Image (tube, helix red, strand yellow):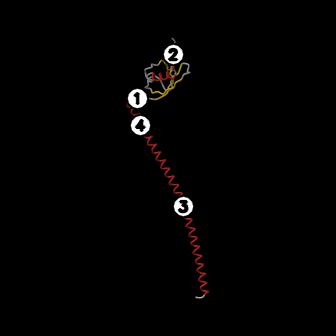
Amino acid sequence: MSNNQINQEILYLKNELNNKNQIIEQQNSIINNLQNQLNALNIANSNNQSLIQNLRNDINIKEQELLTLKNELKIKKEELNKMKSNNMIDKGEIFSINFMSVSHDKIFPVSCSNNDTVVKFEELFYNEYPEYKDHNTYLTVNGKIIKRFKTIEENGIKPGNAIIVDVYDG
């Protein structure tokens, strides 16, 4: 082989080496980009895993709160059923009436059932306005005297009626 051929062969091999080195650099650049993307995805995945764990913890807390509330509701339902079975709750319409002084300066609203006795609410009025405990009083509704130990219904008291608390002169 001649020197010229050898020089051409060397030149060809140098070009080939340069081409291969460029390809290697391109491949290394692609590998670096892919590694950077993989690192970013791993970081995002780690953040997502942390977020998912926080959400799972929140769900567990909410499930515990829900169980607690369900248990409280169950207990309240049992208490209500027990009260109903013991006739502690009268069946009847619930409505409001007002106890008030003759001068209308003392007003005491109550919610009652038509099966409640009047004396039950009269006592509440006297507890609210104790000065009436020192007097003999009588109750009227629509000008008619009320029987204290009869029910709201038996006394003909209707929703929204005002029961007037009056003091005997004497």
First in residue order: circle 3 vs circle 1: 3
**Who's the residue at 59% across and 85% down the image?**
6
Q: Which quadrant of the figure contains the N terminus?
A: bottom right
First in residue order: circle 3 vs circle 4: 3
Judged by depth in the image, the label closer to the viewer, 3 or 1, is: 3
> Is 63 or 39 nearer to us in this picture?
39
Contact between marks 3 and 2 (CB within 8 A): the answer is no
Contact between marks 2 and 4 (CB within 8 A): the answer is no
First in residue order: circle 3 vs circle 2: 3
In the rendered image, the vertical position of residue 66 relative to residue 24, given as above or below = above
Where residue 84 sits, quadrant-wise, is top left
Q: CA distance from mark 2 to mark 1?
A: 33 Å
Question: Considering the numbered disc 1 on the image, is that residue within a helix, a strand or a loop?
Answer: loop
In the rendered image, the vertical position of residue 68 relative to residue 138, given as above or below = below
Residue at label 3?
39
Q: Position of residue 140 (x, y in %)?
A: 49, 19
Residue at label 2?
167
Kind of residue indicated by mark 1 = Met
Kind of residue indicated by mark 4 = Ile
Judged by depth in the image, the label closer to the viewer, 2 or 4, is: 4
Horizontal side of 153 relative to 14 (left or right) equals left
Q: CA distance from mark 3 to mark 4?
A: 54 Å
Kind of residue indicated by mark 2 = Val
Mark 4 neighbour density, 10 Å: few (under 14) some (14–19) many (20 or more):
few
Kind of residue indicated by mark 3 = Asn
Q: CA distance from mark 3 to mark 1?
A: 69 Å
Q: Which mark is residue 75?
A: 4
**Who's the residue at 39% across and 33% down the image?**
82
**Who's the residue at 58% across and 77% down the image?**
17
Contact between marks 2 and 1 (CB within 8 A): the answer is no
Residue at label 1?
88
Question: Considering the numbered disc 3 on the image, is that residue within a helix, a strand or a loop?
Answer: helix
